[in-house]
Image (cartoon, helix red, strand yellow):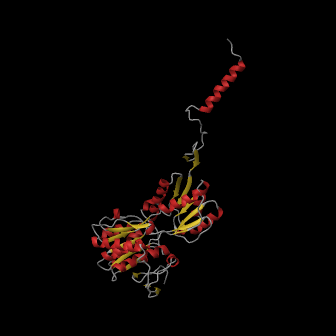
Amino acid sequence: MKIPLCKFSVALLLVVLIFNLTGCSGTGAEVDAGVEDEPVVSIEGDSEDIVEEKLQVGFVYLSSPGDVGWTYTHDEARKYLEEQLPYVETIFVENVPEGGGDPERVMEQMIQKGVKVIIASSFGYMDSVINVAAKYPDVYFLHATGFKQADNVSIYDIREHDATYLTGYIAGKMTETNKVGYVAAQPIPAVIRAVDSFALGVKAANPEASVQLVWTSTWYDPAKEHDAAMSLVDTGADVLAQYQNTPAVQQAAQERGVYSIGFHSDMSAFAPDSNLTSFMWNWGDIYVQEVEKYHNGTWKSEDLWPGMLEGAAGIAPINEDLVPADVIAEVEEIRKSLANKEIAVFSGPLEDNEGNLMAVEGEILSDEALRSISWLVDNVNGALPNSN
């Protein structure tokens, strides 16, 4: 029996349509050639799955995460953010110098790629953040250690001084020459505050000890950090501490057979025979909290400054092979007293190292004073660059 041509054509057309709709793989959809898949996350609904694009979060880094210092701690927090919030996808650009047009160019490129939250992790990015934020009011910015805010710019930092006081106390107990060396980076308030709180810890443990301060005026320069550490040992320092991005100071201490205290992250692996402990940052909870607010539509410009009590600052495990048990016990008691606000690190009387009274008996420096601090406490042997 012959099939009329028109009926055959209709049947053939139906077959072709069914084939095109189902596809060879049976997935129910076909991706256009040359079109890149957008990252998606499936959110279960009551009756059907809803597909939502992932929230893009961009990080701008001054150095490489491999420095095991400042950038490393932010990158660990970036990974934590992705683990805690499955709807988040992050990107980062490393080795972005402060100043000039580089930070703005990098942030603009991120925004063009769909980034909605930008985390600028260095003080020197401050003006760049403000400039770009003004152009993109729907993008939210977090700027580390700065002081300029806008409707879509929050600033954040961590109160390091309780934990750095503890590391200073350990140094004061362990020095035999009464000279503790400190290699510091740039003379911004955050670094000065860390030096001062460390020195106050040294003084509490050993009133006869002083902190010998050397500035490198760089954030990242392993060779310069190493040379500065060596010069401090040459002047008699038998404990070395730092606010630098690499473990070069720790390595110098081990080379010279003196004790050391790290900064930013646990640096014990780089000087196991010298490292007593390290000050450590924990940025992860800040990032999770702020990105959640953005995702929920509840974010607003804030000034964030959590500390040891909130788990944002702490110290690495104390080296029990080097530090006596009674000193470790004392440190734990001081930690509890700080947490309970029974004592305060910056409590008067306080004098700077030029003999000026900076806080009277019983006075506790305000947050405003601490965040703009520009003087060194009286047991620090050194000066701020260009202060003379």
Name the residue nearer the viewer: 219 or 280.
Answer: 280
Percent of width and height locating residue 153: 59, 65
Percent of width and height locating residue 305: 50, 69
Count of numbered circles on the image: 0
Q: Is residue 297 left or right of residue 164?
A: right
Where is 178 relative to 7, above or below? Answer: below
Where is 103 relative to 241, above or below? Answer: above
Where is 218 relative to 66, above or below? Answer: below
Name the residue nearer the viewer: 238 or 360.
Answer: 360
Which quadrant holds the N terminus?
A: top right
Please give the name of the residue rendered at 63% of the width and 29% of the height, measured from the top-left corner: 18
Please give the name of the residue rendered at 49% of the width and 58% of the height, measured from the top-left corner: 78
Percent of width and height locating residue 47: 58, 42
Where is 362 relative to 331, above or below? Answer: below
Percent of width and height locating residue 68: 42, 62
Q: Is residue 299 left or right of residue 336?
A: right
Q: Is residue 324 visible?
A: no
Q: Quadrant of residue 208?
A: bottom left
Q: Is residue 166 left or right of residue 367?
A: left
Please give the name of the residue rendered at 56% of the width and 32% of the height, measured from the top-left corner: 26
Name the residue nearer the viewer: 320 or 330.
Answer: 330
Q: Quadrant of residue 150?
A: bottom right
Q: Is residue 368 visible?
A: yes
Q: Residue furthest front?
A: 46
Please give the name of the residue rendered at 38% of the width and 69% of the height, measured from the top-left corner: 226
